[in-house]
Image (spheres, rainbow, N blue to C red):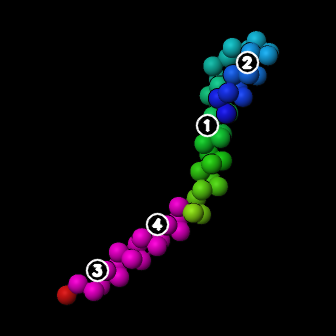
Amino acid sequence: MGVGVSLLQALTQIQEMTLTFVPKVVAMFVTAIIALPFMAGVLINLGENLFSLIATIE
């Protein structure tokens, strides 16, 4: 993402700081939304395993 923004700035000669910040934040949010189902599945599996292990302790 950073290389693409830098290339755009070099081609257009626009050196605005917000131009580098906003696309990176948007890319982070999109990545988080895409990865959210996987992360939730891993956390649910971890929680189920943890509670089953706790239940076996007497």
Three-letter amino acid code of the residue under disc 1: Val
- Measured from the top left, where is residue 10 in percent x and y? 74, 15
**SS for tag 3?**
helix
**SS for tag 1?**
helix
Which residue lies under the disc numbered 2? Answer: 9
Which residue lies under the disc numbered 4? Answer: 43
Q: Can residue 22 be seen in this view?
A: no
Quarter residue 9 falls in: top right
Q: Magenta stretch: give its range.
A: 39-57
The span from disc 3 to disc 4 (Cα, nearest Å) is 16 Å
Q: Do the residues labelled 2 and 4 touch (CB within 8 Å)?
A: no
Pointer 1 or 3: first along the chain? 1
Question: For mark 4, does the 10 Å Cα neighbourhood hold few (<14), some (14 to 19), or many (20 or more) residues?
Answer: few
Residue drawn at (46%, 73%) of the image: 45
Q: Do the residues labelled 3 and 4 touch (CB within 8 Å)?
A: no
Which residue lies under the disc numbered 1? Answer: 25
32 shown above or below 50: above
Residue drawn at (35%, 78%) of the image: 51
The span from disc 1 to disc 2 (Cα, nearest Å) is 17 Å
Three-letter amino acid code of the residue under disc 3: Ile
**SS for tag 2?**
helix
Pointer 4 or 1: first along the chain? 1
Residue drawn at (67%, 27%) of the image: 3
